[in-house]
Amino acid sequence: MNDNLAYQEEIREELIHGEVVAMSPRPMFNHNRVAFRIAHLFENYLRGKRCTAIADGTDLHLTETDCFVPDVMVVCDRDKIKADGVHGAPDLVVEVLSPSTANRDRGYKKEVYARCGVREYWIVNPADRSVEIYLSRENDLVFHRVYSIYPDFVLEKMTEQERAQVATHFQCSLYDDLDIALEDIFTGLLP
């Protein structure tokens, strides 16, 4: 066995409906890059404001049986932030999809986020370079819109009018003055 800590696998876990579930030991490059870019985007925007961006690695305690580790959170009620993590619903949660977590992110976790009061939920897919946005409505997170970077071969088949309608920027519902470019999230990913 190699004693070098850099080579040892870190066991990452979440508590999901009372059951300890192992997460992917280490996110892949594209996953890590996308999560970092989103956290960095919010960190820069929120500097000097009451809300704060929190990157991957921080526990989110939502119920007695559910403790998740989202890729990115935005928390506006700083009283929810404790030494051992965030206690209570963040205003925004971002989950970057991995093959091993996609079903939970789209299913059970989304249900818990909705029930606990998360106002906006993003499911980000590095593979197809898309951001799905869900907004809170009556204790549910309802699909709002998906934003995608279209591959060149798809854009080439579109009419000029269709290409003009392709959204390359979007806004977070929490901040109407924050313009988010898809390129800022997905630039530099591996094929």
Image (tube, grey):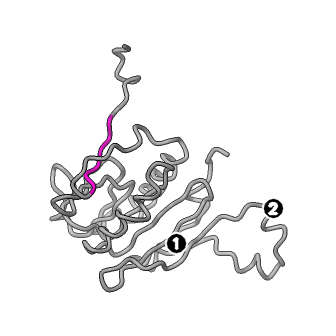
Q: Is residue 133 above or below residue 74?
A: below
Decide if residue 8 is on the left or right side of residue 86: right
* Residue marked by disc 1: 179
Total marks placed: 2
Q: Position of residue 89 (x, y in %)?
A: 25, 68
In the image, farthest residue toward the bottom: 138
Residue 69 location (% of width, % of height): 31, 52
Residue hosting label 2: 153
Quarter of the rendering containing residue 62: bottom left
* Residue at 28% over, 65% down: 75
Image height of 27 relative to 49, above or below: above
Task: Characterize the local packing of mark 2: few (<14), some (14-19) or many (20 or more) Cα atoms within 10 angstroms.
Answer: few
Asked if the magenta segment contains residue 41, the reply would be no
Residue visible at 64% across and 44% down?
A: 190
Sequence-first tag of 2 and 1: 2
Residue found at x 66% / y 64%: 149
| x, y percent for residue 91 | 31, 71
Q: Is residue 7 above or below residue 34?
A: above
* Horizontal side of residue 80 vs 146, given as left or right: left
Q: Residue at x 46, y 77 (%)?
A: 177
Tell me the magenta residue range.
11-16
Quarter location, residue 72: bottom left
Q: Give the overall secondary structure of the magenta segment.
A: strand
Q: Please identify, in this view, whether the residue under mark 2 or under mark 1 is nearer the observer.
A: 2
Classify mark 1: residues with Cα within 10 Å, few (<14), some (14-19) or many (20+).
Answer: few
Q: Amino acid at mark 2?
A: Phe
| SS at mark 2 in the image | helix
Q: Is residue 99 above or below residue 76?
A: above
Q: CA distance from mark 2 to mark 1?
A: 26 Å
Query: Disc number at residue 71?
Result: none
